[in-house]
Image: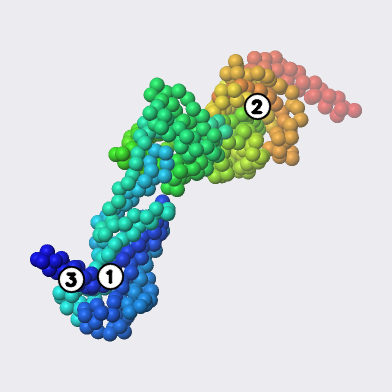
Amino acid sequence: MKKKILAACMFLMLFLLSGCGVELTSKVNLDENFSGTRTMSCTFSSRDFQRYFNGTQKDLDQTIQEVCPSQLTCKKSSKDDSLIYTFSLTFSSLDDYQEKVEKILNFAPKVTWQYGDSPFVSGLIYKENFSSTDLMTWLYTALYEKNYVDKDSAEDFMNLKETTISVKGKTYTTDNKISIDEMKYTQLSSIHIDTKTQDDGSLERRISFYIPQKVLDQNTGKIQAYFQSFNPSWSAWKNGRILNFSFSAGSLTDLSAKTREILHSDSSYGTCAVSSSKENPFGFQMDYRESLDFSNFIQENGTVPVTYTFDGKKVLDDKVKSKSLKFSGEYTQPVSSYDIITVWNTASDIRRKFSFTFDSGCSSQQLSQMKEAFFGDTISNVQLSGDDSSMVLSFEQRGSVKDCSKDLADLFPKSSLTADTRHSLFRGTITSLKDSFAFTSGSKKVKGSYTFASVNASESASIDFGPEKKVTSRKTQALSNREVSRLLRSDETVQDFCQFSVSGDKMELTYEGSTAASHWFSIAQIAIPLILCFGIALFILIRRQWIASKAIKIKDWIEEKISDHKKE
């Protein structure tokens, strides 16, 4: 009999407890990227409303309208004799969710989220340090402050019944704070990512997954199905096998997009900022940024060993889940051939044209940077022409040897141009020009052509070119050359002409112009009259007696002739 009375009392207590306060239910719908909606439904039965609430339904509606956080939307409905207020929170990512929840809670929430759907990581980890009741604190706090509920009623106002979580069709249920851990791991040994810059500027990448034999024995079918659209290859490994993916792309952004697909992640991306090299206008400084997400391959400790190399440089060698990398590299556009034309007049008047041909591996951004690198007071007419397969960059120089040398050295630091003039008593005026040109072609087999033309009619010239072993041919005839003609003025003609074919990206030309003939002619114009005067004076000095006697005889002869003329 006592047992029956005790059971009846317990049933009555449960009945009373089940009917106290507001019934709160919570539902969370998510996708694998933590995008979704959280809804919290507050059900007010008419009996509990009258028992706990010191106001009207209109008072409740107005309070909700005044204090409901902007992050939530509210919808009112009714069922039987109950009022239902449904509050919804929509979010696009974990960061978005945490930001909105923090504003509702007024403290920083802690949310742990991990979702796996790969042969290596499968299941769910989802934990929060708050409950749906905490998310509704603003409501019962406002009702208490407005005296619609008393202190005792406020403490029991919300009765959280359950929280339901749905992720990609699978449902989980908790009664308070969310705490789910149903993750399963199939251990992967390590991941290696190796990237190399090709001669044409493209990037080639190889991603290798080191898979233990035990894992292969249990999951070969799942692994092959997971990567079947990427055409992988297999190679041997002492502890199992290596699953390899090789691919290339024209930019890091495109390369990262392919990497993102293989990693089955939406969080991987890559960018590259390009700037011109200070040492070589055909070189570029590449500032890379790449973010990688390995969530689908982590081990039970939450990370996986990853080795990341770029052009032979090890950028990462660590255990990570995700990683943002920042590193720099260099790329030099190889030049296949070049042509230099120099028109010499004087040290204050030299004209030049440079043309560089290359099979373009550069992006449009790199080509633009390259063209902008060629500037200076003596530099003009910078042009970039051609198509995707072959490009030609050309520019002209006009000015003094000194000014041209300065601008050229700014572009190619190992290049110089010098001229000097000296006078010799026996050789006259001699002008020397030395042209040292060197650049980083990126190719040891680069071919060059150097054309030198002098338009100085007063100089007799001699030209040397080296290194001699690199000169493959030499022409000294004044051949018709349209490019040379474009550097001439209408009243100029070519006096001396040399054209050299060279191998390599370093060479030196020496020009020597002599004005000896015209110099001695000028001396003779002054010296001959002086010599004549000096000879006459010397003759007079030596033969003065003879000259005096001859003068007397001439005088006597003249006087005699005058006397004879008077007699007649």
- Which residue sits furthest left? 2
> In the figure, residue 399 lies in which quadrant?
top right
Is 179 left or right of 14, judged from the image as shown? Answer: right
Is 139 left or right of 219, judged from the image as shown? Answer: left
Q: Which mark is residue 12?
A: 3
Three-letter amino acid code at the position of disc 3: Leu
Query: CB under 8 Å between callouts 3 and 2?
Result: no
Residue at 31% from the left image edge and 84% from the top image edge = 58
Residue 252 in percent (x, y) is at: 49, 41
Earlier in the chain: of badge 3 and badge 2, it is 3
Mark 1 lies on a secondary structure that is strand
Residue at 48% from the left image edge and 31% from the top image edge = 244
Residue at 33% from the left image edge and 37% from the top image edge = 299
Q: Which one is closest to the eye, mark 3 or mark 1?
A: 3
Q: Nearer the viewer, residue 318 or 213?
A: 213
Q: Nearer the viewer, residue 289 or 167?
A: 167
Residue 479 in percent (x, y) is at: 75, 27
Q: What is the spatial separation of the Cα atoms under label 3 and label 2, in whole angstroms?
A: 106 Å
Q: From what the image shows, is residue 232 above or below residue 23?
A: above
Residue 292 visible in the picture: no
Q: What is the spatial separation of the Cα atoms under label 1 and label 2, in whole angstroms?
A: 90 Å
Earlier in the chain: of badge 1 and badge 2, it is 1
Earlier in the chain: of badge 3 and badge 1, it is 3
Q: Which residue is mark 1?
A: 23
Q: Which residue is mark 2?
A: 449
Q: What is the spatial separation of the Cα atoms under label 3 and label 1, in whole angstroms?
A: 19 Å
Task: Answer few, some or many: residues within 10 Å of disc 1's Cα (few below 14, many 20 plus, some between 14 and 19).
Answer: many
Q: Nearer the viewer, residue 421 or 96?
A: 96
